[in-house]
Image: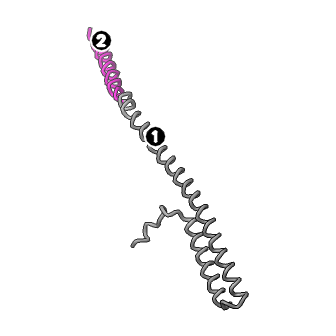
């Protein structure tokens, strides 16, 4: 009879271990079910942020193209008129060269503005 009791105790301890291991893993499906909607919302939020950035960049590039075209047309007209006035002797050549230098500097600044979008900035810039 003495031999039977330890076997019963071993069976009970094995059942207790099995029950405790099952109890330890019961929280996993609950956690997965509770986190899944939050993960879906997070993915949807990131997708909407990405879509917004794509639309913003598309609109900005369309605006930049229109702006560049109109500015180049305007600057070309100014250079053309200044060149004609210089040819007829109404404006000196130095004034024409100065104006061309200013316009070239403006174009370089405009190109820099197109390379770096206005919403991108250096965090150390304001310090």
Identity of the residue furthest to the top in this view: 1
> Where's residue 65, x and y in %?
61, 61
> Where's residue 126, x and y in %?
40, 71
Instruction: Identify the residue at horizontal 60%, vertical 61% (top origin).
Output: 66
Q: Considering only order in the chain, which callout, 1 or 2, is on the residue closer to the N terminus?
A: 2
Instruction: Identify the residue at horizontal 36%, vertical 32% (top origin).
Output: 34
Q: Which residue is mark 1?
A: 44
* Secondary-structure class at tag 1: helix
Query: With 97 as the anchor, is 45 left or right in this view?
Result: left
Instruction: Identify the residue at horizontal 66%, vertical 91% (top origin).
Output: 92
Above or below for 86 versus 34: below
Residue 13 in the magenta stretch? The answer is: yes
> Where's residue 29, x and y in %?
38, 27
Q: Which residue is mark 2?
A: 3
> Where's residue 82, x and y in %?
66, 83
Discs 2/1, front: 1
The C terminus, quarter of image: bottom left
Q: Quadrant of residue 24?
A: top left
- The residue lying toward the viewer, choosing from 20 and 89, is 89
Instruction: Identify the residue at horizontal 69%, vertical 87% (top origin).
Output: 86
Q: Which residues are magenta?
A: 1-27
- Mark 1 crowd level (few <14, some 14–19, many ≥20, 10 Å Cα): few
Cα–Cα span, label 2 and label 1: 63 Å
* Secondary-structure class at tag 2: loop
The N terminus, quarter of image: top left
Query: With 111 as the anchor, is 29 left or right in this view?
Result: left
Proximity of marks 2 and 1: CB atoms separated by less than 8 Å: no
- The residue lying toward the viewer, choosing from 44 and 25, is 44
Q: Main secondary structure of the magenta part?
A: helix
- The residue lying toward the viewer, choosing from 117 and 69, is 69
């Amino acid at each position: 009879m003495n031999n039977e009791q330890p076997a019963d105790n071993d069976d009970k301890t094995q059942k207790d271990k099995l029950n405790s291991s099952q109890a330890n893993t019961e929280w996993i499906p609950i956690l997965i079910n509770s986190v899944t909607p939050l993960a879906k919302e997070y993915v949807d939020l990131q997708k909407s942020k990405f879509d917004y950035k794509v639309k913003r960049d598309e609109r900005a590039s369309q605006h930049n193209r229109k702006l560049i075209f109109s500015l180049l047309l305007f600057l070309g007209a100014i250079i053309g008129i200044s060149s004609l006035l210089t040819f007829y002797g109404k404006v000196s050549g130095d004034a024409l060269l100065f104006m061309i230098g200013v316009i070239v500097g403006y174009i370089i600044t405009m190109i820099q503005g197109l390379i770096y979008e206005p919403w991108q900035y250096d965090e150390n810039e304001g310090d």
